[in-house]
Amino acid sequence: MSDAYFDPNGNPKEITAKRPYKRVKLFASGKLGRLVLDALRRRGQPMTTREIVASIVEKVGYGPDAAKGMSHRVRANLLYQSKIIGRVTKTGERETAKWSLAP
């Protein structure tokens, strides 16, 4: 066993604490992806991330403050669905990017 990870002369009080990850459970497993796809199907045309978030907030009934915390998760879900699963496509970049269902 290597001593690279253990210093017998080390001071444990000098070790910085890790911040625990605090997960906010807004959606059950897979529900956000279904809501994103549902928003795109209902609109029937390409949508910005902001429009998708607004549609989800309206559908689920969360207040307008929920949109702020949700946009990062929706954007991550859209990227996952476009790059890994292939269900959505993206046109444009950054704020002007629009998402649509893959053909």
Image: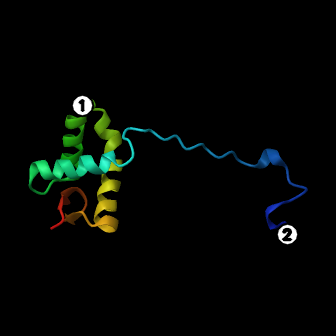
Q: Residue at x 31, y 54 (%)?
A: 75
Residue closest to the far right:
9
The x, y position of residue 62, in whole percent, is: 28, 31
How far apart are the alpha carbons under marks 1 and 2? 56 Å
Relative placement, left or right, of 3 versus 99 is: right
Choose the circle earlier in sequence order: 1 or 2. Answer: 2
Displayed quadrant of residue 9: bottom right
At label 1, counting other C-alpha atoms closer than 10 Å, the crowd grade (few under 14, some 14-19, many 20 or more) is few
The x, y position of residue 32, in whole percent, is: 31, 47
Q: Amino acid at mark 2?
A: Met
Residue closest to the far left:
44
SS class, disc 1: loop
Q: Amino acid at mark 1?
A: Gly
Disc count in the image? Answer: 2
Q: Residue at x 52, y 40 (%)?
A: 22
Of 13 and 24, nearer the camera is 24
Instruction: Name the residue beneath numbered marker 1.
Output: 61
SS class, disc 2: loop
Q: Residue at x 85, y 49 (%)?
A: 11
The x, y position of residue 64, in whole percent, is: 25, 32
Q: Which corner quadrant holds the N terminus?
A: bottom right
Q: Residue at x 18, y 53 (%)?
A: 48
Of 23 and 49, nearer the camera is 23
Instruction: Name the residue beneath numbered marker 2.
Output: 1
